[in-house]
Amino acid sequence: MRAGAVVFRLRMPILGTLVIIGFWAPWIEARAPGPSFGTRTPLLEWLALELSRAGLVRFTAATPAVIVLAALLAAMGAALRVWGTAYLGPGAVHCAAMKAGGVLADGPYRYVRNPLYLGVGFMIAALAFIMPVSGALFAMGTVSAFLFILIRSEENFLSATLGEPYRAYLCAVPRLIPRLRSRLPHAGGKPHWGRAILAELNPIGIFLTFAVFSWSYDNWLMIRAILVSLGVSLVVRALMLGITRADGLPK
């Protein structure tokens, strides 16, 4: 249980480190010989080229198709993050410790137990398109394994804390593959869309980067745009945290 709490507390630095390693791909030499799998060719370009080489689609059509796929993945990630945060609340989403206020069965939580982690998975899948091929494989593999560890840690914690109501929820709602329909009654929670959008500016920025800047075919431009969205999101998050703390001070 303590190990799970430590992993949860460090989840953002760990995820950030795995993504950075995926972009950096230090095992690739600057001028490594051999096929593109061992070079810094972005997955987006590599996949489009392989689709055209296989005769499945012309290269002129393969590249836009891959870009649209990456943008759709980013859109799914942003939508899940905003939707989940709107019901769970930014404070709980970015909290450093696991908490158990009760079983949440509103919004996306009626269809899938971990919409926020599923959103992270879609985000990383989108980012993988502008990583080197081997870096993309590394990031997707390690992030998937780490998210599974996080999910199991949270489930064990909530099962021990909330007891039978949460165990019934585990049986009623799938872990990561959403159901199209839910038989769970609404719990009456109200979404806070404005705060959720402000709290999830980074995934929104990732989607906008793929939707707008990917058509320039400039990988570094896209990376810079994502870094800008990350910086803006961190500033906004700090301001939101400061306002929340100020509101909580005794008057």
Image (cartoon, helix red, strand yellow):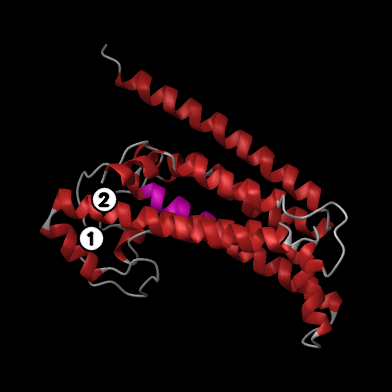
Report the label total. 2
| Residue 85 is inside the magenta segment | yes
Query: Relative to 134, is 6 on the left or the right?
Result: left
Which residue is depicted at the point 30% across and 52% down?
154
> Pointer 2: what residue?
189
- Residue 14, placed above or below residue 167: above
Residue 79 seen:
no
Query: Relative to 33, is 81 on the left or the right?
Result: left
- Residue 19, placed above or below residue 53: above
What crowding class fits label 1: few (fewer than 14 Cα within 10 Å), some (14-19), or many (20 or more)? few
Whether residues under marks 2 and 1 lie with C-beta atoms below 8 angstroms apart, the answer is yes
Name the dominant secondary structure of the magenta segment: helix
| Residue 53 is inside the magenta segment | no
Q: Which mark is residue 244?
A: none
Q: Which residues are magenta?
A: 78-86
> Pointer 1: what residue?
186
The image shows residue 153 at horizontal and vertical percentages of 31, 52
Of 205 and 188, nearer the camera is 205
Of 192 and 178, nearer the camera is 178
- CA gap between label 2 and label 1 equals 8 Å
What crowding class fits label 2: few (fewer than 14 Cα within 10 Å), some (14-19), or many (20 or more)? few
Report helix, strand or loop for mark 1: loop
The image shows residue 61 at horizontal and vertical percentages of 81, 77
Which residue is depicted at the point 61% across and 49% down?
19
Which residue is depicted at the point 75% across and 65% down?
44
The image shows residue 178 at horizontal and vertical percentages of 38, 70
Which residue is depicted at the point 69% across and 51% down?
23
